Amino acid sequence: MGFLKDTDLAIAAEDPALASRFKDLSENGNSTCSAKFTESIATMPSTSLIKGSCCSPMEMKRYVEQVNGLARYRDIAMIPSDPYDIPAGIAQKMMPYYDMKLTSTEQPTYDYAMANSEEKGPCCCQCWRWKVYGGLAKYLIHEHGFNGKQIVDVWNLSDGCGGAM
């Protein structure tokens, strides 16, 4: 477990499988913030995975918080259970929702999330995650009746930029 900081050893001891997944994702990511990468998602096999962080190194403590927090949304298949291991098929389904126009009663919910999420949007930059998670928010608002606080929660837990919040 030499890849872990001393503070992460207790977490790894509690959940060795999650620590192993963290190691794999933090060392073998394929995600970038480039426009070329965003465009490539449409042609990826739907079973392929978009892995790792795009801006900063992942942090074990935050990763565990995110995965555990996202578990409460496991009944909604379109919410990735791991923000650093996203099925391309989900990304492909959510990206078109980004361009969907919300109704006049739905738009304030999205606006609330934009103003109140940690990143002031679905991601720290307008990359593929911005489109995927922006689309996911519109899907959740339109199809599942999510409110602004719920979107903020999903976005904050799904932050894939790396680092701590």
Image: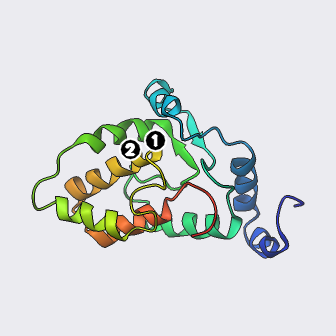
Secondary structure, mark 2, is: helix
Q: Is residue 41 left or right of residue 2?
A: left
* Residue at 35% across, 42% down: 94
**Height in image: 161 above or below 68?**
above
Residue 141 in percent (x, y) is at: 24, 58
Residue 83 in percent (x, y) is at: 54, 54
Q: Is residue 98 left or right of residue 120?
A: left
Pointer 2 residue:
131
* Residue at 47% across, 50% down: 125
Q: Quadrant of the N terminus?
A: bottom right
| Dot 2 alpha-carbon crowd within 10 angstroms: few under 14, some 14 to 19, many 20 or more | many
* Residue at 30% across, 44% down: 98
**Height in image: 86 above or below 109?**
above
- Residue type (three-letter) at the residue carrying disc 1: Trp
- Residue type (three-letter) at the residue carrying disc 2: Lys
Residue 27 in percent (x, y) is at: 75, 47
| Dot 1 alpha-carbon crowd within 10 angstroms: few under 14, some 14 to 19, many 20 or more | many
**Height in image: 93 above or below 11?**
above
Query: Can the viewer see residue 146 in this picture?
Result: no
Secondary structure, mark 1, is: helix
Tell me, yes or no, whether the two marked residues, 2 and 1, touch with CB atoms within 8 Å: yes
Q: Is residue 85 left or right of residue 111?
A: right
Residue 104 in percent (x, y) is at: 9, 58
Q: Find the distance from the CA under tag 2 to the CA under tag 1.
A: 5 Å
Q: Nearer the viewer, residue 70 or 98?
A: 98
Q: Quadrant of the C terminus?
A: bottom right
Q: Nearer the viewer, residue 87 or 107?
A: 107
